[in-house]
Image (cartoon, grey):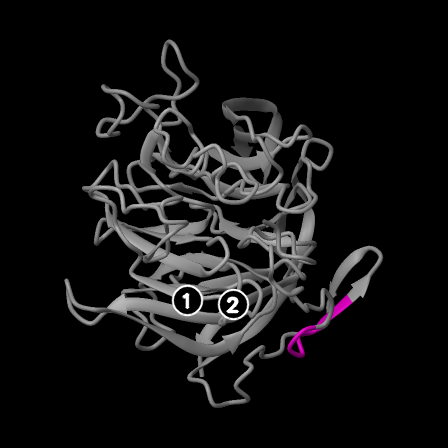
Amino acid sequence: MQCPQTGHSSASMEGMPPTKRSFGLGLGLALILTFGGLRHVGSRSASAASGSSAFRLTTVATANSPIAVIWHPTTKAPFVVEKVGTIRMLAGKPLAPMGIALDLTKEVSSGGEQGLLGAAFSRNGSLLFVNLTNTAGDTEIREYAWQTISADATRERLLLSITQPYGNHNGGHVVVDAEGMLWIGTGDGGSGGDPQNRAQNVDSLLGKMLRIDPRPDDTRPYRIPAGNPFAERGGRPEVWALGLRNPWRYDIDAEGRRLFIGDVGQGTYEEISVVSLDRPGTNFGWKLREGKHAFEGGRKPTGSVDPVTEYSHADGCSVTGGVFYRGKSLKGLAGRFLYGDFCKGWIASVGQRTTGGVWQSRRLGVTLDNLASFNTAPDGEVWVTSTSGTIGRLSGR
């Protein structure tokens, strides 16, 4: 269900106290709320540890409900993806959203967990892919031709449409991998407890990790990549993995050939799962499992994988998955996956000391309210966004 006052997918709220979150100024961040949106008034550290942390979070820009920042692969220009339905370039000193690279405000339903939820460029930057909920509330994956600093709205292709039975659990992220394949994380369709068991149904596109080649063939607006597990047997050929509740942000470790997923829990646990790219068809367990635990007496599916780390709702309410880090600024975090909690705002990392070793999670000592996404810049460093308006950059002290 939806976290109150946040619009972010979260655990079912039955029996949970209201989340006390301020939509405006949080943690001393330099934001001014106006009727026209948010105005940048200078970069300030957002570290909640008052100098005790080895890391800091500095505000670099503000925007209207930013859900992600993406960079063009050739020009390296940054663009902010806003949940209300716009994509704008970040430019100037200080950085600020400039112009409109794509305006879908009249084509999205942007309330609650709906809206423009993700975007990614093709490997050569000639195409832009977006994930949105349309005015009927259904998911659409669209492709636009890209021209220098904006999308060409007259050259739009609908790649995939998925009917959403409820208004929540829409997933929303899209990632283009090193081979140019498009990965699409879908939620289970909503309500609570996945009442129609869509996440375990391989004939449904909901509650899945999908993998497609966005180039059209003779029968579809996209191709089915070799290796998709259900391409030649029962099930939807787009499905790469199943058993997800609401994957809110994920990333691919290209060198290690692993997929990291932040999957939002129901009423008790939030989780981070990891799977080798050599294991298509992996079942992550929902709705039979929540985190590492049985859900409503469900049995663990044969061959399913438990998350590498989890946390209970005593520590937060809604996981925001992140990025696999190979940069240089965040000492000690190379080879670890960064993630956080939307409601409490803390940021953490999870990783192994050695290949095959025990997975360990630790907090960074910095926080950001309404944490919506982690984004890897061209220099390998990490930016984060908050739906309250902040775009920040993580660095070492």
Answer with left or right where residue 300 lies relative to residue 135.
left
Mark 1 = which residue?
311
Depth order, front residue of 77/8: 8
Q: Secondary structure at mark 2?
A: loop
Q: Is residue 193 highlighted in magenta?
A: no
Q: Quadrant of the C terminus?
A: bottom left
In the displayed structure, would residue 364 be above or below residue 97? below
Q: Main secondary structure of the magenta part?
A: loop
Q: Residue furthest top?
A: 218
Picture residue at 34% right of the left edge, 28% below the top: 202
Q: Is residue 30 highlighted in magenta?
A: yes
Picture residue at 52% right of the left edge, 36% below the top: 189
For the record, the magenta segment spans: 26-32
Do tag 1 and tag 2 residues touch (Cβ < 8 Å)? yes
- Which label was assigned to residue 138? none
- Which label was assigned to residue 316? 2
